[in-house]
Image (spheres, rainbow, N blue to C red):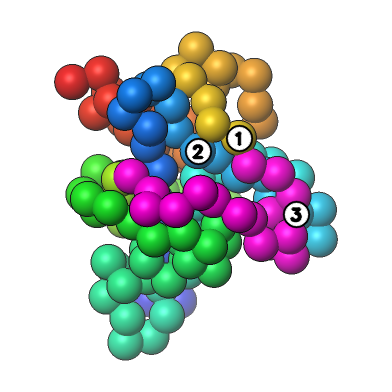
Amino acid sequence: MVDKIQMVGCAFLPINRDNKKILISKRSMHKKHFPGLWEVIGGNLEFGEDFEDCVIREVQEEINAGIKHLEHLHSRAMYLNNLMYITVAYYGELLDEPVFNKEEISEIKWISKEELENFEFCPGDVDLLKMGFEKLEK
């Protein structure tokens, strides 16, 4: 069964509690998978890395920021084209103003829950964002 696992990754939803927004990013057009689609911050787990370290590394690589109050949001297995994608998602606040890596990301944007339908997201990311907005509403 291991040969059916396409990816084990971590996602991070940067939140702004004051204005109830979450930061999303638009994938670069030269990305192999889902070019030009919007997504949550994150990436593949590297061998020997734990989930929290993956999140911290990916946030640093993608938006050059540190994380304040890292909290687990959700873990899931998603099935797409007969392959399994495992994602462990977190949310929290950023310590720094995000500056995106132009090789990986073409744009970033803080959005509200009402704006979700205005973007075309990678598979499964809307569900994670809805969970993140639920946390913001509490």
- Give the residues drawn in magenta, as a range: 93-108
Residue 39: give x, y in percent of width and height: 56, 43
Residue carrying label 2: 23
Quick one: which residue is furthest to the right in this view? 30
Q: Secondary structure at mark 3?
A: loop
Q: Secondary structure at mark 1?
A: strand
Quick one: which residue is furthest to the top in this view? 114
Where on the picture, by quarter, is residue 88? bottom left
For the residues bearing labels 1 and 3, Cβ distance under 8 angstroms: no
Count all numbered tags in the image, as a single digit. Answer: 3
Residue 71: give x, y in percent of width and height: 21, 49
For residue 9, above or below residue 81: below
Point out the tag, 1 or 2, that comes first from the N-terminus.
2
Name which residue lies at 37% across and 53% down: 95
Pointer 1 local density, CA inside 10 Å: few below 14, some 14–19, many at least 20: few
For the residues bearing labels 1 and 2, Cβ distance under 8 angstroms: yes
Q: Quadrant of the N terminus?
A: bottom left
For residue 55, above or below residue 36: below
Amino acid bearing label 2: Leu
Residue carrying label 1: 109
Point out the tag, 1 or 3, that comes first from the N-terminus.
3
Q: What mark, if any, has residue 28 been given in the picture?
A: 3
Label 2, label 3: how many angstroms apart (C-alpha)?
Answer: 16 Å
